Image: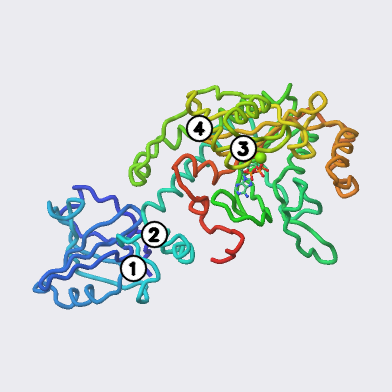
Amino acid sequence: MESLRTHYSIDVTSKEFGKIISVAGWIEDIRNIGSIAFIILRDRKGTLQITALKKQHKEIFDKLVNISRESVISVEGLCQQSDKARNGYEIIPNEVNILSNAETPLPLGVVDKIESELETRLDNRFIDLRKQEIQAIFKIRNEIIAAVHEYLRKEHFIEVHTPNIIASSSEGGTDVFKLKYFEKEAFLAQSPQLYKQMLMSTGLDRVYEIAWYFRAEEHNTRRHLNESTAVDLEMAFIKDEEDVMKILENLVYNMWKRASLCKEELDILNQKVTVPKLPFKRVKYDDVIDNLNKNNCNLQWGADLGSEEEKLLGEIMKKQGHEFYFITKYPIEAKPFYTMPEEEKYSRGFDLACKGVEIASGSQRIHDVDLLINRLNACNLNPKDFESYLKAFRFGMPPHGGFGFGIERFLMNLLDIKNIRECILFPRDRTRLTP
Ligand code: ATP
Ligand code: MG
């Protein structure tokens, strides 16, 4: 059989005018005006027009006007210049093959003017993803991930892959999915935290992972998923958390910059991306609390910020010219067990926020095993459950730190998308397990 590849995504230029070419794709629209029909065919590059004349080729005309929308066809025909066609040329078909028929009615329109509910769109995600504005999100996502690899490899980080099925919870707390692992109980990893830290004892002292986070958080919000992705990174031989923050802000800068080069996709989404200036502002947690309480909040020292407070802080910071800012020196009680304490009540933990939403959390970590055990106990976790992790701290563990940085959160902020479910292909939330 002839390879179909030759049909796909032809970059038609004036060189093709007057030649017979092959194209293939989905039928987006059929306009039949009696003697002539215009078929809009969509492929990965965009759309093109097939013009069928009844008089010239009745059989092909009839075949084309009777195919259901979104069916997949291949067409061979003469490519000719046309000022009236949408991209300056049209194809006059002399052979049409139906590769796959679409059933009717469609569960979701591709180019319809009426906006569908997000639920309907997600139920029919394979069709939703045919829309160019939805594809644009994932093409930009692809670019920013490329920027992650490019920047971190340049900084001598290596990419690793750690287990997702694990024996103890990685972040502590109750938000873990339990599963049966033969005779034992196991969990889905909330993050690669335990493993990337263990790697710090090996000499592979700068690692990152494009990680899956599995979190059994019961709440249904527009910025939480139960399965999400993150850039998760760890680095050893640091002086303090400032070393980690420098890598994180440069990473964000490079991702933002790469996204700003996606001109075609940004136009489709009607978005402008302004590359942020470095360095990002650092604000201490104590100052954040003071500032928020001056603005009618009633926060107790030690509390984590809620989404309303985060939003208000975003507005305050924006007025001072900061879209990105680090919140540093968190109270130890607001941070996970592996966070390095500082003085009595503080920690070397930080968050990075963008426009009032947390996009990353990080810290210097504890590398002393006795202190780590103390902190596990203080967090009501049982050190016995963490023995294989703790062992890696007993035979030479350098000072280290790292962060977790949500990719969907980042995309939401970058493209001003209101619901995080739009930023992942097949979202998992409190009620959605399919498709
Ligand atoms: P939040 O307070 O916003 O719920 P968190 O502090 O629990 O997040 P971390 O454990 O600090 O989350 O995870 C690091 C980063 O991973 C977060 O800053 C965020 O960008 C992303 N992230 C965490 N949980 C989720 C989730 N459920 N859905 C989407 N992204 C998440
Ligand atoms: Mg956090």
Mark 1–mark 3 CB contact (< 8 Å): no
Q: Amino acid at mark 4?
A: Glu
* Other residues around mark 3 within 10 Å, as few (<14) / some (14–19) / many (≥20): many
Q: CA distance from mark 3 to mark 4?
A: 18 Å
Say which amino acid is labelled 1: Glu
Instruction: Please state the horizontal and vertical placement of residue 417, each as a whole percent of the image.
Output: 46, 46
Residue at position x 43%, y 62% from top? 117
Quick one: label 1 or label 4, which is nearer the N terminus? 1
How many angstroms separate mark 2 from mark 3 (CA)?
31 Å
**Which one is earlier in the sequence, the residue at label 1 or at label 3?**
1
Q: How is the image coloured?
A: rainbow
Name the residue: 36% across, 46% down. 269
- Where residue 116 appears, x then y in whole percent? 39, 62
Which quadrant of the render holds ligand 2?
A: top right
For the residue carrying disc 2, how many other residues have a C-alpha within 10 Å: few (<14), some (14-19), or many (20+)? some
Label 2 close to label 1 by CB (< 8 Å): yes
Q: Which amino acid, by three-letter code, is at mark 3?
A: Ala
Identify which amino acid the numbered label 2 is placed on.
Arg
Q: Looking at the picture, does residue 99 appear above or below residue 231?
A: below
Q: Which residue lies under the disc numbered 3? A: 360
> How far, Cα to Cα, is label 2 from label 4?
36 Å
Foreground mark, 2 or 3, reads 3
Mark 3 or 4, which is nearer the eye? 4
Residue carrying label 2? 130
